[in-house]
Image: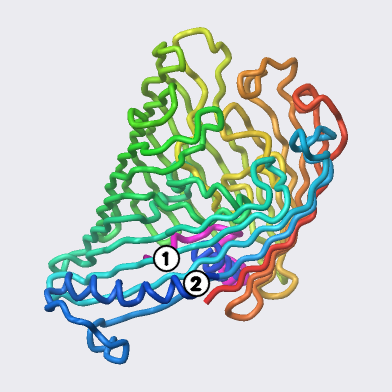
Amino acid sequence: MDPAPYEFAPMNSAQERKLLNFFRGGCQVKKNRHRVSKLCPFLVLFFLFSGGIAHAEIEIQILPEVLDKFSIGGEVNVFYRYDQSPYYGADITPDEGPDTDWGETFSRIRFTAEKNLDWAILEGQFAPFYTETIGQDVYGLVKDDQKSGIDQAWIKFRNIFGSSVDVTAGRQDIKIEKWFLIADGEDQEFGNWLYFHSSFPMALKLDGEFNQLKSTLFWARSGNYVKYWTDGPEDDIDLTGFNLHYDFTEKLYIYGGVYYKNEDQNDTASENDTIAFDIGADASFGGLHLEGEFVYETGDVTDAFGEERDRKAFAGFASATYTLPVQFAPYLRGTYIYFSGDDDPTDNDVEEYDPMFFDFKIWNRWIIGELVGETQLPNYNKQNIIAEVGFSPIEPMVISLMYIRHDLVENNWLGMPLGSDEWADEFNLLIDYPIGDHLFVHSGLGYITPDDAAEEVFGDDENAFFAQLWLNFYF
């Protein structure tokens, strides 16, 4: 399965396009050799059965005679971060002080095979992963724990009967457009900064391409869903969706879709059965890149007491980037992001946006702010203004400085009434550098000053600081 494209910096810059390709490989492809070595025969036997060949033991030496293609790829990630007063002086957990430093690892290996069946091309992938948190993370969630599991386990029938229609079934990624609404199908639980495991445990997807029109129709079931923070984790959430994408030109396209989340199978008392209508556009004119997306949500909300209410919520973003046609490709970007909040939790209308299945795509999309978005403000009842400048001192390195203004839409936080909607100012300095063909290096610094709302929630007003380093080796 080809990774979905990342959108990192202005796409008309050759340096940034190259960086994007490295970063995509690191994030999308984003210890246990004995277990992994057992997967190859299993995959071979599966393809023999699917291709109509009689069952028999196959020696690895004749693998090229059985399959048209067979590849092994993977990655190893190492991350370290130091946080000083991330909650503005409050303790991270009752047993921890106000500061922390911790590390994470995330490793993944994938086996991909392909066989031409004449009427279709059969492709399959199996990818286990391992992740670990070392020390107390800044989220207050994990300390010295690890997890292993399966990231991908799917089969795909490509170009069915010579058409441009593909069908994919099994554990797989479903990442729609810019990932603002649909992308993350399962909580990783551990290694929460290196959050690269996001597949849906079970899904069926139908993709089609008809000249300039592309379509995606899918059904999926999530696992360990925690996007709503106050309602989770929840298992077995059904999601059905349909998306259309139309390319007017190579530099102008629109997209739109409708998605239904059904929480009837969840493990919690409350339910958020949400219908989301989505529309977006992307256009480039010379050095100017414009993009935006809007989501309107309706549906039923049942609280823990069995009371039913109607959702009427919305969210969206608009962004403009201009790249100067000079040496080092300097660029300027301005972005506004809005997630509606509920001004009256006692009436029949729920105006708070349901963040659905969004995922991290790249900085400030859609974890907004390397500290505040990571740890304090979920993607509802908030708005952000982001000013960003960046340049490429050497190809393909990108250095970017971001200012993020964080505000609440309504004067409450996770149901707690507040006297202000002003949260914090955040500054992030980020350096991203692909070195060679297999190594990506990221380093970052951040400084955050709290405002009245954050001070009221955490009871202190100390400024926060972080420093982080991420190494990604991939093949």
Q: Secondary structure at mark 1?
A: strand
- Seen as rendered, the residue at the extreme right is 462
Please, what is the dominant secondary structure of the magenta stretch?
A: loop
Q: Residue at x 47, y 52 (%)?
A: 198
Look at the picture and state if 27 lies above or below 93.
Answer: below
Q: Amino acid at mark 2?
A: Gly
Q: Which residue, given by chain and number where applicable, does mark 2 sit on?
A: 74
Q: Residue at x 68, y 61 (%)?
A: 79
Q: Secondary structure at mark 2?
A: strand
Q: Answer with left or right where residue 240 lies relative to residue 318.
A: left
Quadrant where the image shows the N terminus: bottom left
Q: Position of residue 117 (x, y in %)?
A: 15, 74
- Seen as rendered, the residue at the extreme top is 347
Q: Position of residue 162 (x, y in %)?
A: 15, 69
User: For the magenta stretch, what is the residue range?
Assistant: 1-18
- Seen as rendered, the residue at the extreme front is 34
Q: Residue at x 27, y 58 (%)?
A: 168
Q: Position of residue 346 (x, y in %)?
A: 52, 8
Residue 385 on the magenta span: no
Residue 4 on the magenta span: yes
The number of callouts visible is: 2
Q: Mark 2 and mark 1 in contact (Cβ < 8 Å)?
A: yes
Using the image as rendered, state which of residue 190 and residue 391 is in the foreground: 190
Mark 2 residue crowding within 10 angstroms, few (<14) / some (14–19) / many (20+): many
Of the two numbered discs 1 and 2 on the same chain, state the one appearing first in sequence: 2
Look at the picture and state if 120 lies above or below 356.
Answer: below
Q: Which residue, given by chain and number where applicable, does mark 1 sit on?
A: 127
Look at the picture and state if 319 lies above or below 152.
Answer: above
Q: Residue at x 28, y 54 (%)?
A: 213
Q: Position of residue 241 (x, y in %)?
A: 31, 41
Q: Amino acid at mark 1?
A: Ala
